[in-house]
Each structure stands twice: as C-alpha cells, then as structure tokens.
Amino acid sequence: MTQNQIIRTIGLTSLITASLICADSGFAQSVQNEPGSVQDSRPELEADTQAIGEPVSGRPSPAALSWSSPDRFDKGVSSRVAIRSGLIVEVHATESLLHNALYYHIGKLDRAHGTVEWGPSHVFVASGAWPAVALTQDGHVIFTWSDGFYNCCSKLMYRVGTVSLNGDTNQRVDFKTDEITYDTGFHNSISINGEGIIAEAHESGNGGKGIYYRLGHLKNPTQGDSSIVWDTGNNGIKYDEGIDPQISINDSYQVAEVHGVAREKLLHYIRGTANTKSITFNDEHPRYDDNATKPGVVLRNNGSLVEVHQSGNAAHYRTGKLSALNLARIDWSAGELLSRKDQLAMEPGVAVDGNDAIAVFSHSEKLNYSVAKLP
C-alpha cells in the first residue's frame, strides 16, 4: 500500500467514525499568470480531513493558548502588526469616516508581564485603506496598503523605512522610499522571512474575484536602495478564487495562506513552497472553518501556526501544525475565543516573535491587543 493510500484509508476511517458518532447523537486587473488549473476554493471536506474545527483523531492536538485580557491602545480600524526582537510595529486606518489616513505605532513587548508599552501614533499616509506591515531582522519596515476601498479601481502601494530594534517607543520610522505603486487590487497582506524573501498576497483589481501573490526582496538597502524588486515579475500571479488573502512565509521557504469566500462565511487554507521566483501551491485548498471571516496567519520556523479570524462579532484563534503525513494539510486545533465573550472584536491580526504572540483587533472603533505564550 502506498503512502497516499495509507493516508486516504486513515482519513476515510476517521470520517466514517465521525459520521457514526453524529448519527448516534441525533483599475486593470493583474495579468493572470495562472497555474494550469485553479482549484475550487470551496471543496467539501475530503476523506482525510478533520471535521471543521476539530483535530484529527490519533494525531497530537495543537496547543490551546492563554491570551491576556484585551487592553486598549488607540482608536481605529483594520489593525495589523509585526514584531521582531520584542519591538512591535502596528499599523491601522483612522476611525473617522471623513479622514482616510493611515497610522503606525511603535511598541515594546514586556515578556515578563505580558504587556506592551506603546509609543505615540504617527500618520504616514494621507489617504489609504487595508494596511499591512512586515518587519525584517535588521529593522526594515515594509508598509503596504490600498489607495481605495473597492476592487473596481484600487491600486496597491508600498513604502519602506527603518527602525531600531533596540530603540524606544518614541522613535519614528525613518522612511527610505516614497509611496510606490506596485499593482492593482486591495485587501493585501505581506510577510518576510529571515532570508529577506517577501511574500505578498492580494485580491484582484477591476472587480475580479481572483487572489494573487508576489515574491520579492529589498533591492540594495545597505547601499541606500530600499525599493522592492518583484522576483515574480511585473504582475501578480493568480493562485485561487477568494477574498481577504493572508500569507506567511518561514525561513524554510514554506508558505501558508488563508482566505475567505465572497458572500459566504467559509475559510480555506493552502500550503506551498517558495523559491526565488514562484510559489508552488498544493492543489488541495481545504476548508477549515465554515462560520468565520477576516483571517490572519503566522507560520513559524518549526512548522507550527497561529491563526486568527472573526466569528460573528468576536475574535477567535486556532493553532496548527504542518502535517507530515499529507503535504497539503494542516492539523488545526478547534477554534477558541480570543476576545472576551462580552466584547466586540473585529478584523483581528496576529504576529509571532519566538514564543510570544500578539493579536490586535478593533472594538467599536477602539484598538485592542492581547498577548500569549506559545509552547
């Protein structure tokens, strides 16, 4: 029996067992450099998949986390966060309907007490939406955002600067580039690994339904050129249909991506492997939640993951592990509440630094954070 046959057999047995238990209990769009075929992003649960929100029987269950009580640090919406060596860069959109500026904060994690010291809020873009942020090991900060609120006519922008990872929270980002347009689209995300490889994902522009990725690197920051070279070419590469794509790349060039489905509360994930010019995504794009939106994800170097999402008006999280039995799969924990039951928590974002995780989310246009220790 081949390995794939063994996997399928194990999965089918688990599915049959679960079924018996249930019965007993009652602008222009990016050029589409598409792979050979884009898989349907909404497959039914395949035979070797765990039931939604449950770990696979017989495999170690990913760990539950103990998050600190949410603490307010500002007002705004669409918050995202990055962290390196305990230094945090957070980015968000203004809370005002009459003002579309984007802001950042510098913070310091107090690991002993599980709190964050935040510096003042600084505006860095006069008008924008859906910001994202990544932070390199040497203190380069990459901000990305959309210049509009809709995919009919939005452009994607980036700006690069530096911070001192050993500096205090009153420092400002020392910007090395102006605002640079790099694509059409919106709802983007960005990640950078320890090797300096940038992975970016976004929804298409021009009203399309596809999601696209890019790979790149900073051109020559030591010589004063911190612009991004897009190694995948001038256009994004389509890899699926969906909305709200969030991507993460680790130092082993492993990639995890999560995204939603338009007009439905379904979340899917995809595993992949990157080289310098492309990502090879697995053909299977399994569903892992059927009642959630607005996901975020971090893939760690040890193959474990922390995922966050919005379920109803609350923030939830999962932990996970890249499956060694099936290279298309992630073994997820059950979805757990991150925010308090009595607290609204929208559009969560997450970042990880060593064994520390930080989540940010908005609550009635107020920004909150929580931290947790990872195993």
Image (cartoon, rainbow, N blue to C red):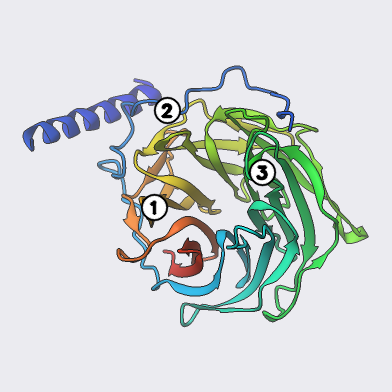
Position above or below: 139 against 128: below
How far, Cα to Cα, is label 1 from label 2?
A: 20 Å
Identify the image quadrant of residue 216: top right
Out of 332 and 104, give the one closest to the viewer.
104
Q: Looking at the image, can residue 45 be seen?
A: yes
| Dots 2, 3 in contact, CB < 8 A | no
Label 2, secondary structure: give it. loop
Give the amino acid type for the residue marked by disc 1 in the picture. Answer: Arg
Q: Residues within 10 Å of mark 2 (few under 14, many from 20)?
A: some
Question: Residue 168, image x and y in percent?
Answer: 69, 81
First of labels 1, 2 by sequence position: 2
Out of 196 and 260, give the one closest to the viewer.
260
Give the left or right position of residue 141, taking residue 291 as reference.
right
Residue at point 56% right, 72% down? 74
Position above or below: 36 against 358: above
Q: Residues within 10 Å of mark 1 (few under 14, many from 20)?
A: many
First of labels 2, 3 by sequence position: 2
Question: Residue 318, image x and y in percent?
Answer: 39, 52
Label 3, secondary structure: give it. strand
Name the residue carrying label 1.
318
**Mark 1 or 2: the one toward you:** 2
Which mark is drawn over residue 42? 2
Position above or below: 247 against 339: above
Question: Residue 23, image x and y in percent?
Answer: 10, 31
Give the amino acid type for the residue marked by disc 2 in the picture. Answer: Arg
How far, Cα to Cα, is label 3 from label 1?
A: 22 Å
Which mark is drawn over residue 200? 3
Tell how many labels.
Answer: 3
Give the amino acid type for the residue marked by disc 3 in the picture. Answer: Glu
Q: Looking at the image, can residue 355 be seen?
A: no
Question: Residue 71, image x and y in percent?
Answer: 45, 74
